[in-house]
Amino acid sequence: MSEPVLLANFREYYQTGLDSFKTKKYNSAANEFFKAFITLCDLAIYRKLKLLPDNHDDRFKILKINFPEIFKIDVSLFDVYRRTYKLRLSKEDAKRIQDGAAELAKILNIKENL
């Protein structure tokens, strides 16, 4: 996987999140925004370490050591995201994850109209 693939995946997930948000499917929106966020986490890791994590646990460990500022965002959003498994999320919950993805895109100098 390369940076262009990760960026394409980010754009797809983020756009799908926007589409779901517009139709008030907040669990789906949160899920897609979180995937967009995680893809950007992987991009940060790839840019610096030239590797990609295999799962959330690996990603958390790498972020905690190498990207503490991103790790703080990730942990808070992951807790919201996990609620999609059992609960109905609010518009505010989905927006929080969307904002996290947009914030990380800004940190990584991703020039997107978010």
Image: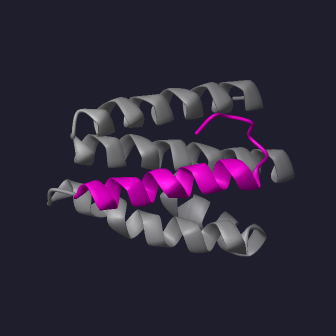
* Quarter of the view holding residue 67: bottom right
Figure colour scheme? one colour
Do we see residue 90 in this rendering?
A: yes
Residue at 76%, 45% in the rendered image: 46
User: Which is more toward the observer, 113 or 7?
Assistant: 113
Judging depth in this view, the residue of 29 and 4 nearest the camera is 29
Q: In which quarter of the image is the C terminus?
A: top right
Would you place residue 73 above or below residue 103 in this image? below
Q: Where is residue 95 in the image (x, y as percent from the top left)?
A: 39, 54
The residue positioned 65% from the left and 32% from the top of the image is 6
At 31% from the left edge and 60% from the top edge, which residue is drawn?
Answer: 92
Residue drawn where x is 46% and y is 50% of the image: 98
Image: 51 above or below 73? above
Question: From this viewpoint, is residue 53 visible?
Answer: no
Eyeballing the image, is 27 above or below 87?
A: above
**Residue 111 magenta-drawn?**
yes
Residue 108 colored in magenta in the image: yes
Q: Is residue 89 left or right of residue 10?
A: left
Dominant SS in magenta: helix
In the rendered structure, the answer to whether residue 97 lies left or right of residue 110 reads left
* Residue situated in front as seen by the camera: 108 or 6: 108
Counting from the top left corner in percent of width and height, residue 32 is at: 39, 40
User: Where in the figure is residue 12, as x and y percent of width and height?
Assistant: 50, 26
* In this rendering, position of residue 107 left or right of residue 26: right
Q: Give the range drawn in magenta.
A: 90-114
Quadrant placement of the N terminus: top right
Residue 69 lies, in percent from the top left, at 70, 72
Q: Quadrant of residue 61?
A: bottom right
